[in-house]
Image: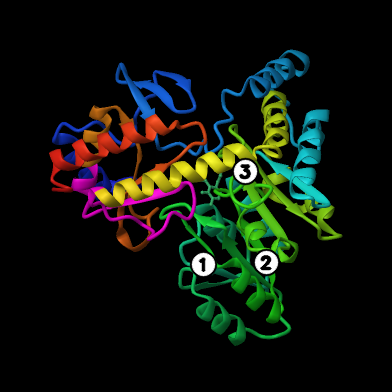
Amino acid sequence: MPDLLAKFDPLIEQRAALLEGGVTDPFNLVMEKVESPTVAICNGRRTILLGTYNYMGMTFDPDVVSAGQKALEDFGSGTTGSRVLNGTYSGHKAVEQALKEFYAMEHAMVFSTGYQANLGIISTVAGKDDYIILDIDSHASIYDGCALGNAQIVPFRHNDVEALEKRLKRLPPEAGKLVVLEGVYSMLGDVAPLNEMIAVSKANGAMVLVDEAHSMGFIGEHGRGVAEAQGVIDDVDFIIGTFSKSVGTVGGFCVSNHPKFEILRLVCRPYVFTASLPPSVVATAATSIRKLMNSADKRAHLWENSKRLHAGLRQLGFTLGTDEPQSAIIAVIMPDLETGAAMWEALLQEGLYVNLARPPATPAGMTLLRCSLCALHSEEQVGEILGMFAAAGRATGCIS
Ligand SMILES: Cc1ncc(COP(=O)(O)O)c(C=O)c1O
């Protein structure tokens, strides 16, 4: 009998070779205790967290936690049903209302994850004979949304406005077109030129979807994301987001001003054919989103952290994914996977957790140590982090 898992042998061997050197498995770290959004106990030691998406530090917010506890007591542990059957509770409507107010948009639809939001909206909105024009560095959930649907896929070079325009001009003028962009690209932490890209898309008759997963809560005057910061949010047809980053729980959503948007609730398979989020989750999300509306001070502190870390790492001699800090993600480029894993391990020994990212998640075959800052990292913690990078970098030969 042919072993269907044999195709994974090269990966099994690569992983075994990495672990033979005695390093901790970078993809299997256990958080034994989480003390706060910035500190956990890993392998029995205090570890600063610099590899979570907890940008706004909402996971331990007392109002958020107590809203979840109350909903758990009042509504039970789960809905056991789809949103279109028994799975819509008052809490689901309340979180959709909070999203509409947060984005100042007419419609909001909540999914069980951000992954499913992309899967559902992309595969449903763009059908047979339509075209999806997407940045080649798009998140896996965007590619999977394309794979689930029947539209023709047209990729273009990362953040290249001219390439986008060229692709659009080659398509039949009368065809339905959906341009899919991200506000912040999560591997290098770079921001898209959405103002130019959206102008080009609209001039060529395309609708636009922007995934603002990594900018919600942080970028833009009201934390609505890169489209807000660049003054083009009113031209975006669909914004996709997640509760698993700045909101601090789990879930996904799409907001829109499209007058026919509500029909999607009946035709979007990843919305219809799955159970809805538990009442405690939607209660924590709604409370968190409302608090994010008034978080200008936290946003300012997060920018300070991002600038401080970016400048400090550069000064130490590390190569970074962007010349300037553009978001809360700062990617340190490693020469190869072995060095990256050694550096990751050395940082963990120092008491710092970052994400080790490698292909296929990363662009151009890169190995990255991805640092994501939190609004609750103190100035002292950022100083400690830089000290750990200096020590680990010298120990592994990454810097001199
Ligand atoms: C750009 C982007 N979109 C969507 C998602 C999926 O979000 P979720 O964790 O809610 O499934 C992610 C998650 O990392 C992401 O980076």
Amino acid type at mark 1 = Asp
Which amino acid, by three-letter code, is at mark 3? Gly
Instruction: Identify residue for label 1.
Output: 135
| Image point (48%, 55%), residue name | 326
Residue 227, located in which quarter of the rendered image? bottom right
Which part of the image, by quadrant, shows the N terminus?
Answer: top left
The residue under the point 68% across, 46% down is: 253
- In the picture of the structure, the residue carrying the numbered disc 2 is 208
Decide if residue 243 is in sight here: no
Q: CA distance from mark 3 to mark 2?
A: 21 Å
Q: CA distance from mark 3 to mark 1?
A: 23 Å
- Residue holding disc 3: 217
**Image x and y of residue 146, in percent:** 58, 61
What's the amino acid at mark 2? Val
Q: Which residues are magenta?
A: 316-342
The question of residue 320 being in magenta is answered with: yes
What's the distance in space between the residues labelled 1 and 2, CA to CA? 12 Å
Q: Residue furthest top?
A: 73
CB within 8 Å, label 3 to label 2: no
Q: Secondary structure at mark 2?
A: strand
Considering only order in the chain, which callout, 2 or 3, is on the residue closer to the N terminus? 2
**Residue 352 counted in the magenta span:** no
Q: Which mark is residue 243?
A: none
The image shows residue 117 at horizontal and vertical percentages of: 65, 48
